[in-house]
Image: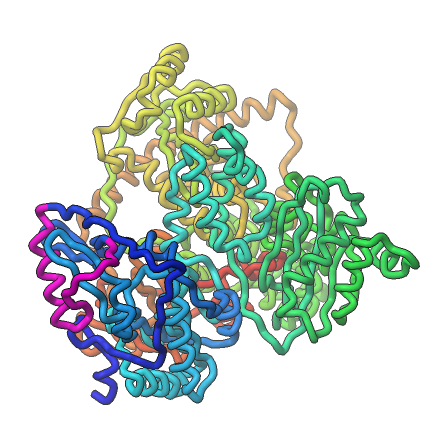
Amino acid sequence: MKFKPAFSKNIKTLGHCDLVTPTISTIHPHPISSTPYPIPQSLQTHAQNYLEELIAADIIEENTAEWASPMVLVKKKNHTNDNPSLRLALDLRLLNNVIDGCSYPLPKIQDITTKLAGFKLFTVLDLNSAYWQIHLPKEYRKFLTFTTPWKTFQFKRLPFGIKHAAAYFQSMMDKVLSKCKHNGIHCYQDDIIIAANSIQELNAKLNDVLSTLQENNLTLAPDKCSFATQEIQYLGFTISSQGITPGINNTDKICKFTTPENQKQLKRFLGMCGYYRHLIPDYATKVHLLNISSNSRTFTWTSEHQEKFQELQRTFFTKPFIVQTDWTKQFFLNTDGSHIAIAGILMQKQDDGELQPISYYSRTLTATESRYPANKIELLAIHNSVKYFREFLFGRKFTILSDHMNFKYHTNLQNPANIVARWLMDLSEYEFDFQHIKGKNNLLADYISREKHGHADMSADTILPASMNTQTINTLITQELSNEIILAAQDTDDDIQKIKSSLQEGKHKNKEKYFINDNSGLLMHITFHQNYLKEDICHKTIVIPHSLKKPALQQAHLSHMGIDKTYFILKERFFWDGMYSDTVNYVTSCISCCQYKRKPHQKQVYGQTPIPTKPSEFISIDIVGPVRSNNYVLTVLDHFSKHAELFPITNIQAPTIARKIIQYITTFGRPGMILSDLGTQFTANIFKQITSMAGIALHHTTSRNPKANGQSERINTALKTTILSLTDHKIDFDLAVAVHKSFYNSTKHSSHGFTPDIVHFGRNLSLIFDTITAPIESPLLTEEGYTNTLLSSLQVLQQQIRDNLEKQQDKQQARLNSNTTQRAPKVGDVVYTLSGNQFRPKFDGPFEVIKKPNKHTCIIRELDNPQAPELKVNIHKLKISCKRFDYLKTNGPNQSDVQTTHQGPVLRPRIL
């Protein structure tokens, strides 16, 4: 191999570079000496063997000197008691206090991530035991003598822990990589990143770097390098061509951080979060209260502190996101201020016309600044934001977006106050346009700088903030479909126009199937069927033109239900030829469903429960969560009607659960029996007392057996998919739960063939977008007539449901006894691969099978991207999907349904 010498698997083949010469000078001549730290008996033999290896590798040598620091053994990640893996380090705190430092600047991490903009492929290289590859002159080795329980040694290479080691190492790497001929190569300490737009370009740059490292006798750790990936973990960030998010490992630590019990723990938490503050809108306000607590003399923790703590954790769980900088596009700076904080968001307009965030800035105001008048705070926000983003804005024309009406007034003042004059003088260095936004519409920065904020009416061209994507549910669903839009689309559809013309002329051969609505002018379709009372029903639906098939499917599939439920929603409201096959294709190719749902035909053996005879006779309860950080949902399922009531909750303590059960009882009536698992909230005395007082029989499943409550488990699985899919696209958690409940209860249930709403309430409740469908004309009844009709209908309905439930249990048992499995993937199939990461969807994709070397293995590549690297995957880790029909595709190759339906968000989540 040409570059084999550039890699070292162990310290024996470690590189040795003398491009820089470290020096050590002390501020006084008096030696620093410490006694050795004790080594546990179980590790002594391993520690001695490790020291012998370092001597053999020419990294340390025996000596005696007046200077001495104690040795410390640090466990590596792969350390186990049976197979110890240790790293040698020194406690150099005393030495560092008496030696002079070395001034050499380390790269700014944000500068490196900014320079990676526009690249699609990345390679990350990691030097093996990096500092040990720098030669240490003999005259300075005495200072780095260290003591052990057996002997004293000194380093012949630069050790970790000495205070100017990072400066010397960065200086060396900058000199080495300055010899490379290509751009897109960056280094922070021992981590080298190579960015490119094609495999050919990446290979050329990689060859350049490896040749340079080899010439300078530096070696890499092969197990720590990653090659030609579209997404990398680098310096604590997840970086891809789509943008930047916090790294998975650090996100995991932040989200799992337990409630701080003292100031030290709180400062540690805030330090972890602060590293990502440029990715997080509202950061200054979110940490304002926590910062006060961390700096106070006494540690206090209230419910308000806990709320802010959990809010910050939720921010990380929902993946804060910024896009890569495009230096060819204009910058927009949106600013605002309040008595608490000032804020700015740097943005660029993308190809789709949306403003996307490049970086966030915010800080809390000092006590003096908080007393400034409002117009002065607004000017401070503009000044500080421009100053913060100077490296982006200086020398370029940009636009400031602000609701600061008096900005021009300040610029025209003859004798401004001293501090205002200084701010205006600083701003005079920049070339910018000022665009005023009405205060009620400046939600973008208002959201950052205010603790409490309302919702304002927004026009279509108003800039929307990343975290304000929770518009009203009605807007979310119906913004692309209305009577006017459908009528306009019908008027431009040739096939529909032919039908309308023939109907108006009385010549249409199927005029019993179509008619034109007198009020709306819409072409309607008529079908006849029998209801459960064996009555003939005339069902009228809107004929959807070809151009609106995609929006109709998006609406019906918003809750990410399966094929049958999505089709039920459609056929109750719309009609077009081939609607079922389009539904199958749309649902099967839905990226969110493919990523979050389990593989089809994956057996789930659930316990069977007795069949009740009426609603409210038997309910089961369960808890879903935590989903998206510290959010939970209490699910209550009626086993007869299959009606589900979902309660979003922030904790699962017994009093909270008890209050929700009381709320359920007062709304839907007292159930005869409740089934739950053995969770402590369901076995607590308060819960038992409530059920006992209400005369409710309480039953529990066996320990660690969730499938015994199978019907609730199925509801929970579907609910998780909806929540994860919608909140991944910045939809509010409570809103996602409400969407799922509405769609679930309004669609036909496979067990009894009716909607849970009609069984539970005797009528179907409207879905959110039902305002655009034709009203069902019913005969007018008196109150007594309506009651008699409803009661007789429900009696027939309940008997039919009991029969259907019995039949469905038999079908389920037969399905479990079958051996149906997913077919083997073949070349050309669209597939998803198991991710194996709890902070990502269950499956990654979409990919395309391009080769099949044998019956157990597939070679896959990112769909519609021939330049993407090829991956070798076992077929058991693949889930088969399909390619979406061209006329049903969304605007981008990797956008899922919610993003296209809901055009408000400025953040577009990456597809993992």
The residue closer to the viewer here, 364 or 199, is 364
The residue closer to the viewer here, 281 or 26, is 26
Q: Is residue 316 left or right of residue 872?
A: right
Q: Position of residue 552 (x, y in %)?
A: 56, 58
Determine which quarter of the picture holds residue 525. Answer: bottom right
Magenta stretch holds residue 428: no
* Residue at screen point 62% across, 42% down: 776
* Residue at screen point 27% across, 82% down: 217
> Colour mode?
rainbow
Give the residue furthest to the top. 693
The residue closer to the viewer here, 393 or 21, is 21
* Residue at screen point 82% across, 58% down: 421
Magenta stretch holds residue 60: yes
Label total for image: 0
Q: Is residue 490 left or right of residue 677?
A: right
Rendered-image quadrant of the C terminus: bottom left
Rendered-image quadrant of the N terminus: bottom left
Give the residue furthest to the right. 414
- Report the span colored magenta: 41-69
Q: Position of residue 836 (x, y in %)?
A: 29, 57
Q: Position of residue 667 (x, y in %)?
A: 51, 23
Give the residue furthest to the left. 45
Tell me if I can see residue 825 in this picture: no
* Residue at screen point 79% across, 45% down: 374
Look at the picture and state if 203 lies above or below 644.
below
Q: Is residue 479 left or right of residue 159?
A: right
Tell me if I can see residue 213 in this picture: yes
